[in-house]
Amino acid sequence: MSGGVDSSLTAALLIQKGFEVCGVTMWLETEEFGERSCCSSSEIRDAKIVAAQLGIKHYIADFRNFFRAEIEDYFVAEYLKGRTPNPCVQCNKKIKFGKLLDFANEIGADFLATGHYARIIFEDDRYKLKKALDIHKDQSYVLYNLTPEKLSRILLPLGEFSKTETRALAEKLKLISAHKKDSQEICFIPNDDYKAFILNRAEDADALQAGEIVDTAGNILGRHCGVANYTIGQRKGLGIAAPNPLYVVKLDVANRRVIVGNAEEVFTDNLTAENVHWIYEPKFPARMQAKIRYGPRVADCTVEENLRVKFDTPQRAVTAGQSIVFYDGDEVLGGGIIR
């Protein structure tokens, strides 16, 4: 229970269905969080109030040290390699459906329920992870690291609802969180300033040192303030003048270079994935759809056994460090990290 409307309604719906429910709030807030985290002291307070309103027991699971090591340090390390990580994917893998599921086992719970917008369905003799019915709220992209065994122990009651329906139900049940704002951006970055966060953790790193901005032919166009401050596809904030718009197309940490190109050079029709996890592994080569970033858009592609992905149409800003997630219609097959 994060103290927000989604997890509050999840608890309420399970009580209505006859489950014996208790709430667990993860304490992840470190000294740099401020009060914007979904797992801060103020959110713990709100979750406690909701639990009391529902008449259920409430636990606090202190994962602060583990979160810093596995999520915050990972986030910084990836940027220092010139990659753009997705900490929500890592958090779901390591924290919510790792440490939190272990905690559920310790207190004797049969299931772990969350407020994620996705669906778990048992059909064809196996558990399947599927997109939420509300495609614009769907969070299946960040859940691809789940295993069939974990899917059998997880409940996602909100996968059938839209956010509007969720708030309406919460209001009908008079939950105090019914109109609480959704958490935005990265929970552990104060003021959404990831550059300042990285600088505070690793100010002497090569990726934070000044260097050259060059075009794809190697011509020097200007200077930058650190490769880690840029991401693939970026146009604004380059600080260089050119007759046509230029975009970041590659980050070269070793040579402290930000490489820019025209709009066409931001597109590619292939990539290689690493650290791939399959919920249901297909026979290769396999036709499927894929997402290369969070959002509703998918692209048709062919995946080879060596995890080379070839898209039917070129994709914009394929970014190392982000997740590529594979789908068969609305079913999540698995995913990995773009190399």
Image: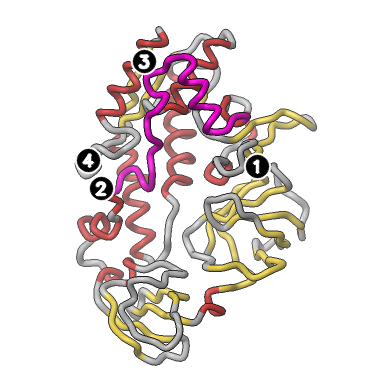
Q: CA distance from mark 2 to mark 1?
A: 34 Å
Q: Residues within 10 Å of mark 2 (few under 14, many from 20)?
A: some
- Tag 4–tag 2 contact (CB < 8 Å): yes
According to the picture, the residue beneath numbered tag 4 turns out to be: 34
Which element type, helix, strand or loop, lies under badge 2?
helix
Q: Amino acid at mark 2?
A: Pro
Q: Amino acid at mark 3?
A: His
127 in relation to 137, above or below: above
Residue at image point 44% right, 80% down: 246
Quarter holding residue 243: bottom left
Mark earlier in primary sequence (3, 2): 3
Which element type, helix, strand or loop, lies under badge 1?
loop
Q: CA distance from mark 4 to mark 1?
A: 36 Å
Report the number of discs: 4
Q: Which mark is residue 279?
A: 1
According to the picture, the residue beneath numbered tag 2 turns out to be: 190
Q: CA distance from mark 3 to mark 4?
A: 23 Å
Q: Amino acid at mark 1?
A: Ile
According to the picture, the residue beneath numbered tag 3 turns out to be: 58
Q: Judge left or right: residue 286 versus residue 94.
A: right
Quarter holding residue 225: bottom left
Q: CA distance from mark 3 to mark 2?
A: 27 Å
Mark earlier in primary sequence (4, 2): 4
Which element type, helix, strand or loop, lies under badge 3?
strand
Q: Main secondary structure of the magenta part?
A: loop
Residue 257 makes an appearance in the image: yes
Q: Which portion, as a residue range, is magenta?
A: 160-189
